[in-house]
Amino acid sequence: MATVKETLGEVDKSIISLDMDKTVADAVSLLVEHEIGALVVVDKEGKPAGMFTERDVLKCWTRKGERHFKDIKVSEVMSTNLIIVEADDDLCYVTTIMIKNRIRHLPVLENNKLVAMLSIRDVVKAQVSDLRAENHYLKDYISDKYPG
């Protein structure tokens, strides 16, 4: 099975992040502008402090009452139990993490540096590609076309 690093060749490596003192309105604008579902929230030093996702928008909408998104700081509603994967992690392992924790986006570290955001779509796409190749080889093997 492929690793995250091998999959990153097909993934947009730009990471859209937001300072934790920005508002939910700022975060929603970034999500819409970049057509993405998650942002990495960074602290004053630029280090990952949490994630802000589409789900956080919905939670914010239902839990913050009459307050407007422009009056709510991202730090009040972001997910702080940040789960990060390494570039050398196996995609099966990453899939397990995503399913077990019910998450769709994972920041990726390489040499202690944030290098990409991996989505469940990226993982599934890579696994489907692997399965297609395996299916092709098995068909060749069964039909005696396998050179072995």
Image: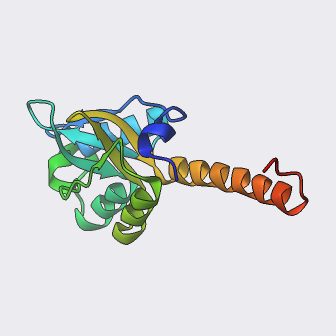
Residue 89, horizontal then vertical, whole percent: 36, 49
At x 41% / y 66%, what residue is drawn? Answer: 96
136 sits to left or right of 46: right
Front residue of 81/92: it is: 92
Colour mode? rainbow
At x 23% / y 33%, what residue is drawn? Answer: 111
At x 13% / y 38%, what residue is drawn? Answer: 21
Residue 47, horizontal then vertical, whole percent: 15, 36
Residue 70, horizontal then vertical, whole percent: 24, 42
Location of residue 23 with respect to 145 vertically, above or below: above
Location of residue 22 with respect to 85 vertically, above or below: above
Displayed quadrant of residue 110: top left
Front residue of 49/147: it is: 147
Front residue of 120/43: it is: 120
131 sits to left or right of 62: right
Residue 18, horizontal then vertical, whole percent: 25, 35
Observer able to see residue 72? no
